[in-house]
Each structure stands twice: as structure tokens, then as C-alpha cells.
Amino acid sequence: MNDKVYSKIKKSLSSLTIKDIIHIEENDPQFKALKRMYSHYGTNKVLFIKLVVINALLSYQLPMKGEKYWESFANYFSHNKNINSFPEFLKKNNYRLFNAKLKRFKKAREAVNEIFKTEKDLKNAINNIGEFLNRLSYLLNQKKDAKTVVFAIKMFIYACRIMYNKNIIAPKGIFIPMDSRIKSISDDKNFWKKLEKETKIPLIHIDAILWLSHEKWRK
């Protein structure tokens, strides 16, 4: 563990309030992209959340920066309101390992269709995010700390905050999505678990703060 980097991050995070964190997240380009996309969905919350969760589960080996990818997703699905449009979207915007992603899309589609049958299911997931994570990882047959699985939780929270205009906060104990930006700070899981424990900020929310400023904290 890099103690110097850890101390620097801990000091910076410890000065933040929940209000500060929400402000940072709502200025995340990915949040803004979802907000713009949702303006085209009216009351169709279930379809919107399914699309967001599926896209998060497919967000790996991207051919462009994450910010640009979610911008492309929002642009495409603002006008193509159909889960079955994903293969065409992937061909144009997320074409690396296309066959593997197509297979994963089908599995992700089955999972979200099982979890989100009605808006009541969506509200239940908001009220018990930990249980939502359990079900998602079970249906995908993946570990609960798998990168895209926990990233799906982060984007689920963003989407629900937009739909319901409520400050939805993740529980502690959900791991940080370990993508290349976060790994450039530390790839030590104990580093992140200790940071959550000592700052009392859920890792899902630490992710947004550090992901947007990762170059500042590199080990």
C-alpha cells in the first residue's frame, strides 16, 4: 500500500460532505448524459433502467473514453428506445470483443428482465441496493465485486437519482469498480476497503470523485 497516496486521498475525502459528493457526481459527464437521455423517456422508468444497467454491464474494453462512450449511448438510445437495438449499438460504439459482448448482452438482458418486471421492482431495488447487487451477481454468475457488476450499481444509482430526483446513496460494503483509472491509483483491494472504513464514504461514491480526477492521485 502506498501510504503517501493513501494519506493524501484520505485527507481530501474527509473534508467532503454528502452534499459535496452529490454535487461532484451530478457534474460527472456520465450523469449528464443519462439526464439528457431520460428527458426522452417520460414515465417509462423500467425501460430506461434496463438500458442503463445493461450498458454498464457491457462497459469494458471500450474503444473510446468512458465519458464519450456514455455520450454515444445517450445519443443512440434517446431515439432507439428498444433493448433489442443493443447489438447494432455495440457494432458502432463498443465493437471490441463483439461476439463476447453479444453473448453478455443476452445474459444481461435476461437478468434485467427478471429483476425489473414493474416499477415496484425498481423501487424495491432502490430501497435495498445490497439485495439488488446480490441478485444481479447471482443471475450473471459473477462475483459481487466484479468490475462491471459494481459499475452497474453506480449507474443504477445515477439513473434512479435522475428519475426520482432523490439523493440516493449506496450502502457501504459495495466494492469500487476497478477499471484502469482506479487501478492507476491502487490495485490493492485493502487500500480501498480501508479508505471506505476510515472516511465513512461508500466506495461507489468515492469512485466518482477519484475517477474524474485520477491523474491527480496516481501512484
Image (tube, rainbow, N blue to C red):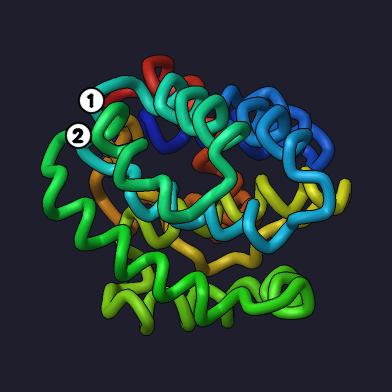
Q: Residues within 10 Å of mark 1 (few under 14, many from 20)?
A: few
26 with respect to 145 (left or right): right
The image quarter in which residue 89 lies: top left
Residue 123 vertical position relative to residue 44 in the rendered view, above or below: below
Q: Which amino acid type is shown beneath numbered disc 1?
A: Pro
Q: Considering the numbered disc 1 on the image, is that residue within a helix, a strand or a loop? A: loop
Q: Decide: is 97 above or below 73.
A: below
Find residue 30 and report its horizontal and vertical position in percent. Answer: 56, 30
Could you say which is closer to the camera, residue 163 or residue 129?
Answer: 163
Quadrant of the rendered image containing residue 21 = top right
Q: Position of residue 19 (x, y in %)?
A: 83, 38
Asked if one can make out residue 80 in the rendered structure from this viewpoint, the answer is: yes
Residue 94: x %, y % from top left: 27, 34
Do the residues bearing badges 2 and 1 touch, measured as CB atoms within 8 Å? yes
Q: Which residue is mark 2?
A: 95
For discs 2 and 1, the disc positioned in front in the rendered view = 2
- At 29% from the left and 38% from the top, the residue drawn is 90
Q: In this rendering, does residue 15 appear at all?
A: no
Q: In the rendered image, which quarter contains the N terminus?
A: top left
Task: Give the mark nearest the N terminus, 2 or 1.
Answer: 1
Q: Which residue is at a point 79% across and 39% down the rendered structure image?
A: 17
The amino acid type of the residue labelled 2 equals: Tyr
Q: Secondary structure at mark 2?
A: loop
3D distance between C-alphas at marks 2 and 1: 7 Å
Q: Residue at x 33, y 49 (%)?
A: 58
Q: Nearer the viewer, residue 20 or 142?
A: 142
Left or right: residue 209 versus residue 122 is: left
**Which quarter of the image is occupied by the C terminus?**
top left
Q: Which residue is mark 1?
A: 63
